[in-house]
Image: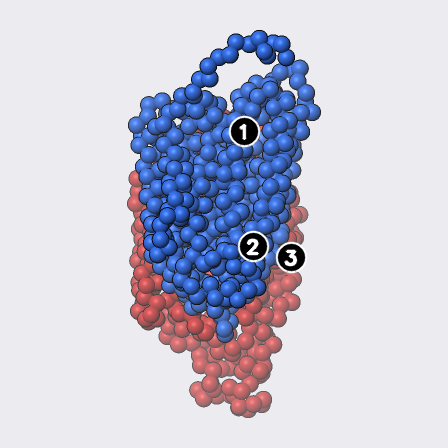
Chain colours: A blue, B red
Amino acid sequence: MTTFLSQTVERLQAPEIDYWAVAPLLIVLGAACLSVLFEAFLPKAVRWAAQVLLTFFTLLGAGFALLTYAVAEETLEQGKLTLAGTIAVDRPVIFLWATLLMLGLGSVLLIADRSVEPGGAFVADASILPGSGGVREQLIRREMQTEVFPLTLFALGGMMTFVAANDLLTMFIALEVLSLPLYLMAGLARRRRLLSQEAAVKYFLLGAFASAFFLYGVALLYGFAGSVKLADIANATTATDRSDTLLYAGFGLLIVGLLFKASVGPFHAWTPDVYQGSPTPVTAFMAACTKVAAFGGILRVLYGAFERSSWEWSGVLWGVAIASMVIGAVLGLTQTDVKRMIAYSSVAHAGFLLIGAISLNDAGLSGTMFYLMAYGFTTIAAFGVVSLVRNADGEATHLSQWAGLAKRSPLAAAVFTFLLLALAGLPLTSGFVGKFAVFAAAIEAGMTPLVVIALVASAVAAFFYLRVIVLMYFSEPAVDGPTVSVPGAFTTIAITLGAAVTLVLGVYPPDVLEWAGAGVFIF
Amino acid sequence: MSWTLIALLLLPLVGSLVVAFLRGNDRLAKTVALAFSLVELALAVLAWTAFDPGGERLQLTSSADWIPAFGVHLSFGVDGIALVMIALIAFLVPVVIGGSWADKLPEGRSAGGFFALLLAMQTGMVGVFAATDVFVFYVFFEAVLVPMYFLIGRFGGPNRQYAAMKFFLYSLLGGLIMLASVIGLYVVSADKLGQGTFDWATLVTVTRDLPLSTQIWLFLGFFIAFAIKAPLVPLHTWLPDAGAEAPVGAGVLLVGILDKIGTFGFLRYCLPLFPAASKELAPVVLVLAVVGILYGSLLAVGQSDMKRFVAYTSIAHFGFIALGIFAFSSQAGTGAVLYMVNHGISTGMLFLVVGMVMARGGSRLIEDYGGMAKLTPVLGGLFFVAGLSSLALPGTNSFVSEFLVLIGSYPNAPVYTILAAVGMVLAALYVLWLYQRVFQGPVRGTALIDAVGGPGAAVDPEKASVPDLNKRELAVLAPLVALILVLGFYPKPVLDVITPSVGATLSEVGVADPVAQEGK
């Protein structure tokens, strides 16, 4: 106590901020605040248009800022730390930011669409009680809760901060900033209100638990290392005089929080329910962007803080990866709802991604990031197609309703088939290149048995993708089956973008692979 | 840089797209598809003439960067073995298009879609045999599944969904296991050379020095994939289903070409890349091969469904091919490659004539037919020719290859060869018995009896409602018959192309050739 009091009081130094480097982050978060003001002050009639414009320009502006920084900056090779070392802007972060912005753009296109579901996929007034007459009445109102736009921007800003956070506290705050909007967005579906609200509550409760795990882990690691900075934790793991218990417990709790967000099995329990209940554009946003953010965080934490203690924990994460692949592949087989099926597929993909992440080599880093981008675009396009297949009650997500879809709408069926083949990882799709990159890194790291299990899991998972193709092409259409809506411009662009990227990354991936492998994390 | 192979690859793909756009007009779509396949055949003839049997191991090569990050090059080239297979593809596709010209498709399906898929598959098949980069080979290996899956699933028989799914999953599982080995090769080469590569010729020099245990693991990855494709017992169960449910045209390509990817893979990848493992595991493969010959033959005898019958005879034949490859002698190896070609011709023809029988009787079951030769003497005769070629009668093409396989295998694997020879006897049994039941005796069976006006009625082929072969069908079968006879009496042109490549393959394995030594 005395030493504390006798310290000379230094003036608090304001941290140096490299505004240029963090410009994309500031643009997104600033626009999010502006967007909230729009909600407060703009008349209802113009809100939707204003929000859509603001969101698009924000994403494009942030992308432009990122691009100019990436092209112009000489120090880029190493990357730089800013904001007193709490934010790192290095090559992987730039790749992940770009991925997030592009996937965010794709998701926003789906979110903004108002032609597929008249008025948009979002509830006109979220405060209407389920079971009251208002639920029916709002179905035909051509308006929506435009708050979804600021929520999206905040979530995206949180995700961008999350992948760039260089200490665990910043990371925790970013985790909350990205999670809270998602909890709300999950409950905003126009149709099937109860299911949507159930999804929101479930996601919130389990997410709160996961955040608590994460925070407890941070606390223990602080006890272990005396710092929350990733670099300091890494240094502490090499010292011999510290408590291993704190390290293991802290790491375990921390990683549980991260794996939850990434919907890696066995921490995936929320995934199918939330994917099914959320409005489909939000599901696409969660499936693509949250995955990128969560795995970006996992990569940074593993490479930054725990690389040198990897022999302590790699066995556990082997087990987690196997569990995730097996759960995703096997339970996916039993699904009858297309959104739940894609949810389990995402659990299996999370297992594949984790294999890349725990390879802990350069190839693993670039492979995982490439996989994230490839998977994100495929998923957005897939959910885009899902949102088109509708009957009188909204989206027809039960698989039996998809029978004979190829006859009704050959184009939608063909696009969806292509996306499913990409998810299954067939050559000439981005899914194959991603799997290949990740598995090659894993074998290089000596994890051949894990790769063999992953390949078998891929074969099992292929069965349920194929089952959908069989339904669409080889079965006779149901008499009162769903129709495929003609998508509006926004959804068309989103699906085209997703499918085109899936094809291009499958046929000619070298440039993006090179970009993903251009540099490593700095801490 | 040779453009021949690239043209061979791209032409059917372009054709497929064109035909897909012409789906509205069936007749035009068929004609365009046939035209593309004939131009492809002409290109294949060009490639054949450009190939110098005594020259380099891989010829007509071309290469371009694809994914530098993984050391993947888009490289193509052929040796004699690949060349004859590509020639066989180019020959069979127009035959198949002609043979499927008047197929009754399931309701709501267009002929244009069918032929577009056939041409798309042709690109995939050529790519598999022409690739000299292991990664590219893998890409084509998997890519070829997709059109075949749709061909079976959309245009096949009553149980087509099940068969298509089973076909796809078996092949995909095999392919994924192979992928582990493919990645393994990459990592091994990165270890040795600093920079990983998939170039086949480079990999051969890298992998042959690997320790035996590593070789065995990598070998198994490839071998399982190829054994599923080929198919060897016990990984064969998908073939009878797929073969039975596939439309006839797709079935010809399935057993005629697709399955040969397996045996081609043994020769191109398993043997040269992993010589020590190949020698170590050869006895296991030989056992599987002989089991396949006997088991396939016995099950063929017992089949009641003609298409399943053809599938089981193929399983027996693939046993012979595997025996020839893993007996490690130049005669047996040459015989095995020639067998791959001949099997494509004779089984392809058998499949086609079975299809023609079915088109008349409307049933796949043998018991629904009887005495058909009285109604359709020409079809009966050609069915008999196809059967004789299948059982390797001297004077037909298959005799040369089967004889070479047996005589070449005997010095190295006498017991297996003797057991395999029993398969020849069984082949005579199953072919002749099938012919007898379907074509000989009085006209009978539910499929035919109405055509002649009830049991015991006087048969007059002129008046019966079961027509004999028409001009189109004759034109489709004529080239097959011609090849069966020509290759039966004068196989030299094909052998000349095959022999040096087989010799090179065996020298990569490093086995002494017992027959050649006796000669000295």
Residue A284 image position (x, y, % from top left): 47, 50
Query: Along the polypeptide, which appears first: circle 1 or circle 2?
Result: 1
Q: Mark 1, mark 3: which one is toward the viewer? A: 1
Residue type, mark 2 in image:
Gln
Identify the subunit bearing mark 2: A
The answer to whether one can see residue A280 in this image is yes
Residue type, mark 1 in image:
Leu
Residue in the picture at 48% in, 12% down? A10
For label 3, the crowd category at 10 Å Cα-Cα, with few meaning under 14, some 14 to 19 and many 20 or more, is many
Which label number is shown at residue A197?
2
Q: Mark 3, mark 2: which one is toward the viewer? A: 2
Residue in the picture at 45% in, 58% down? A124
Where residue A412 sits, quadrant-wise, is: bottom left
Foreground pick, B397 / A36? A36
Whether labels 1 and 2 belong to a single chain: the reply is yes
For label 2, the crowd category at 10 Å Cα-Cα, with few meaning under 14, some 14 to 19 and many 20 or more, is many
Q: CA distance from mark 1 to mark 2?
A: 30 Å
Up the image or down, B238 lies above or below B2; here it is below
| SS at badge 3 | helix
Up the image or down, B443 lies above or below B348; here it is below
| SS at badge 1 | helix
Identify the subunit bearing mark 3: B
Residue type, mark 3 in image:
Leu
Residue at which label 1 appears: A169
Residue at which label 3 appears: B294
Residue in the picture at 61% in, 76% down? B367
Foreground pick, B100 / B74? B74
